[in-house]
Image: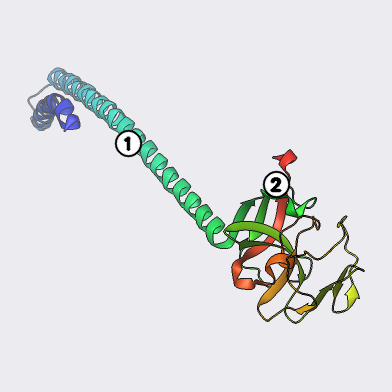
Amino acid sequence: MTLSVLNRPSTARHAAKRTQVQAAKRTQVQAANRPEVDAANRSEVDAAFRIEEDAVNRAQGRVVGGVEESAGQVGGLVVVDSAWRRLGWLGVKIGVICGLGVLLFTLVYGFHYAVDPGMTPTVKAGDLTLFYRWDKDYRAGDLVVLSHGGETQIRRVIAVAGDSVNITEEGLLINGALQMEAGIYQSTERYIEGVDFPLVVPDGEVFVLGDAREEAVDSRIYGTVSVSDTQGTVITVLKRRNL
């Protein structure tokens, strides 16, 4: 609408000039075909034709300029609209990435903030752990996240289904073999009010201990743990001093 309003007067002038030029052309042709018209008259006709043609060209230049000006104004609106579109798509992309991140750390990975000292020194209170939910094919030595008594713990798998576990004055025995565990600085002893030993780990369960053997609440108290009650395998420990 803006483009039509701007160009209407110039277009009218253009049409008028075009009519004049056409009339001048007809006059020129007629003059050329008339033998009685002398060279002076033909020169006057040619000069008039050139003047009218120049006027039309100037009018066309103004019209074109108006179009360009209007197009520039419309183009500005197009640029602004395009910028908003790009911002909109950027927002959509950010939303999709955030949604995928939520799903990723809800269904595949998880974080656990350690609050108990039962896994010291491997995992201290205040450390942040990243665990993988889909890895529950546990082996001895794995760190797992589990729930017990409404609390989330991190414990070390000591024995899996079919293994025999015993705690004697010698220490921790798995399938009759005394365990020499690296990174464990406290002796492994039974708890007075704990489970009876020796025991065999049932199918679909694991026996877990805390690395802080003198104070950890673990399978020596609540027995073996069902794999279905675990949340996954710890894959990264972010130390509190590094956070």
Quarter where residue 54 is shown: top left
Name the amino acid, label 2.
Answer: Asp
Q: Pick whichever, 156 or 237, lies toward us.
A: 156
Name the amino acid, label 1.
Answer: Val
The residue carrying mark 1 is 78
Q: Is residue 222 above or below residue 8?
A: below
Residue 226, x across and y down, in percent? 63, 73
* Helix, strand or loop at mark 2: loop
Residue 217, x across and y down, in percent? 71, 59
The residue carrying mark 2 is 127
Q: Quadrant of the C terminus?
A: top right
In space, the residues marked 1 and 2 are separated at their CA atoms by 53 Å
Q: Is residue 34 above or below residue 133?
A: above
* Helix, strand or loop at mark 1: helix
Q: Quadrant of the N terminus?
A: top left
| Residue 28 visible in the snapshot | no
